[in-house]
Image: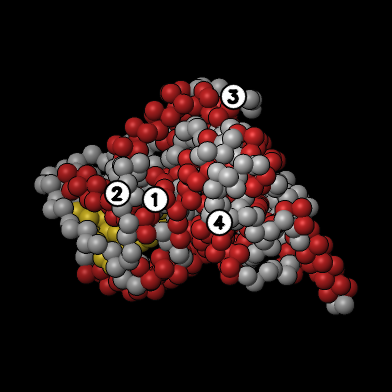
């Protein structure tokens, strides 16, 4: 009997799982699945303990659903990618696996791991990979010179045309295997990794994720464009965690969006196109990883920014992490992150800009910290967002654009509702002073005890540091 093995990675779902669907096309084949945890690799990549727990919870749901269809899930744990290759190179011949199916991961180390495994297996087990975590295949959206776009808007415009042509459909869940009894549900032992339950806001399982997607598209999307930048409102999809570990696919989001809003592909000012734009941003970051693998090594896309002289100050960095900078919108954002393992996207931009442009601390320190905290931590999106904020990446804001954290707070949290939620010490501060409480005349009488700003935004040193970096880079080029 032919044996097909599905190697599950960040695709923990039955529906619209390209590798699983392909493995099940031969109705006579024996189909098994495997998930291999790599705790040391996760440590090296700073995975959040809550993301690790979220993966385990969803893996347990998936194991039951696969077993009900006659597909046994094997679970194994080993330190890193090299050990993954060793284990699979032994498992496949032992189980007489004829074909191995998996969905691509686009990070550099993951692609190298897959290449090494295919080499180790030789022709004994045929490996077949699929583009699954994207709407369009990386490399399929390009300039007239067959190059990846370096600016987002022309990429999006080309992407929309290709998306309308292809209209990527969702694949059905596999049917129960013919003649195969329900498989035994394997025990998913706790990972050898710190794990913190993500809480009720993150229910596990594909059914829960699809329900959240339907609710968002039918009840919240119409107000998405107006409310998405206001952190005090529950106006975003909050689906990123399920997308990151693959309990949802981008195609499921796209097709649900098109069903609710058939004209979503038409550029406009409505919530449907605005959210589609976010899905395209997500794709673009994956396309960039493939086009410029150095991004996976945390190298800046813009070469001269390597010469920025970053400030080394652990006290300032710790104050930023703890939400004690004295800039209220930044502090509230960092405390939201610490307590909920998620941060509103507008606040990600504001807090990242503050770390880099006000404190002049290397963006890679912030990138690592976010990965260690976020339940939706994802290398492509996290790196892309930080490089945008730091003006080191593609489509980055000019280096001389610096967010003013106070005016950003006044604009997007005008009445201080978000600030007061996360900074309870400021509940009694009047609206007029909630973004600068130390200017409140009654602050001392009211016993206000809140840190003063750790830097003066008006004297932020980033502009000079970036200009000096450009000068040093130009001087170095001239000397060659």
Q: Quadrant of residue 187?
A: bottom left
Q: Quadrant of residue 92?
A: bottom left
- Earlier sequence position, callout 3 versus callout 1: 1
- Earlier sequence position, callout 2 versus callout 4: 2
* Disc 2 target residue: 58
User: Residue 270: which numbered mark, if any?
Assistant: 3
Residue neighbourhood size for the residue with mark 1, other residues' Cα within 10 Å, grouped as few (<14), some (14–19), many (≥20): many
Residue extending furthest toward the right? 478
- Earlier sequence position, callout 1 versus callout 2: 2
| Rendered residue at 49%/27% (across/down) | 221
| Residue 217, position as x, y percentages in the image | 45, 27
Secondary structure beneath dot 4 equals loop
- Earlier sequence position, callout 4 versus callout 1: 1
Secondary structure beneath dot 2 equals helix
| Residue 302, position as x, y percentages in the image | 72, 60
Q: CA distance from mark 4 to mark 1?
A: 31 Å
Secondary structure beneath dot 1 equals helix
């Amino acid at each position: 009997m032919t044996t097909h093995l599905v190697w599950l990675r960040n695709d923990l779902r039955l529906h619209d799982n390209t590798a699983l669907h392909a493995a099940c096309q031969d109705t006579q084949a024996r189909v098994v699945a495997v998930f291999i945890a790599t705790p040391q690799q996760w440590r090296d990549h700073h995975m959040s303990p809550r993301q690790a727990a979220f993966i385990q919870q969803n893996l347990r749901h998936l194991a039951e659903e696969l077993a009900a269809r006659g597909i046994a899930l094997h679970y194994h744990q080993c330190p890193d990618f090299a050990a993954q290759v060793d284990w699979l190179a032994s498992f496949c011949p032992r189980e007489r696996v004829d074909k191995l199916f998996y969905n691509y991961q686009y990070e550099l180390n993951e692609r190298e791991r897959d290449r090494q495994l295919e080499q180790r297996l030789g022709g004994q087990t045929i490996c077949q990979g699929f583009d699954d975590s994207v709407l369009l295949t990386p490399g399929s959206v390009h300039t007239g010179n067959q190059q990846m776009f370096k600016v987002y808007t022309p990429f999006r415009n080309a992407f929309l045309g290709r998306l309308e042509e292809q209209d990527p459909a969702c694949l059905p869940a596999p049917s129960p295997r013919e003649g195969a009894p329900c498989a035994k549900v394997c025990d998913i032992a706790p990972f050898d990794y710190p794990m913190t339950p993500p809480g009720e806001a993150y229910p596990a399982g594909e059914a829960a994720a699809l329900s959240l997607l339907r609710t968002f598209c039918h009840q919240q999307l119409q107000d998405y464009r107006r409310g998405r930048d206001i952190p005090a409102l529950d106006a975003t999809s909050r689906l990123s965690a399920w997308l990151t570990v693959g309990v949802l696919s981008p195609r499921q989001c796209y097709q649900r969006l098109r069903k609710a809003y058939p004209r979503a592909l038409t550029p406009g000012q409505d919530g449907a196109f605005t959210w589609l734009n976010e899905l395209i941003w997500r794709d673009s970051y994956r396309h960039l990883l493939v086009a410029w693998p150095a991004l996976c090594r945390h190298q800046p896309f813009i070469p001269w920014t390597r010469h920025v002289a970053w400030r080394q100050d652990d006290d300032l960095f710790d104050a930023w992490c703890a939400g004690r900078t004295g800039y209220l919108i930044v502090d509230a954002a960092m405390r939201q992150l610490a307590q909920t393992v998620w941060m509103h996207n507008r606040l990600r931009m504001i807090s990242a800009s503050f770390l880099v442009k006000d404190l002049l601390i290397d963006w890679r320190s912030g990138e690592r910290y976010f990965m260690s905290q976020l339940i939706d931590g994802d290398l492509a999106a996290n790196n892309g967002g930080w490089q945008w904020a730091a003006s080191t990446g593609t489509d980055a804001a000019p280096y001389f654009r610096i967010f003013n954290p106070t005016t950003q707070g006044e604009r997007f949290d005008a009445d201080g509702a978000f600030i007061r939620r996360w900074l309870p010490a400021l509940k009694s501060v009047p609206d007029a002073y909630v973004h600068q409480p130390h200017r409140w005349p009654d602050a001392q009488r009211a016993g206000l005890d809140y840190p003063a700003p750790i830097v003066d935004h008006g004297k932020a040193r980033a502009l000079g540091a970036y200009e000096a970096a450009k000068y040093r880079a130009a001087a170095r080029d001239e000397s060659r």
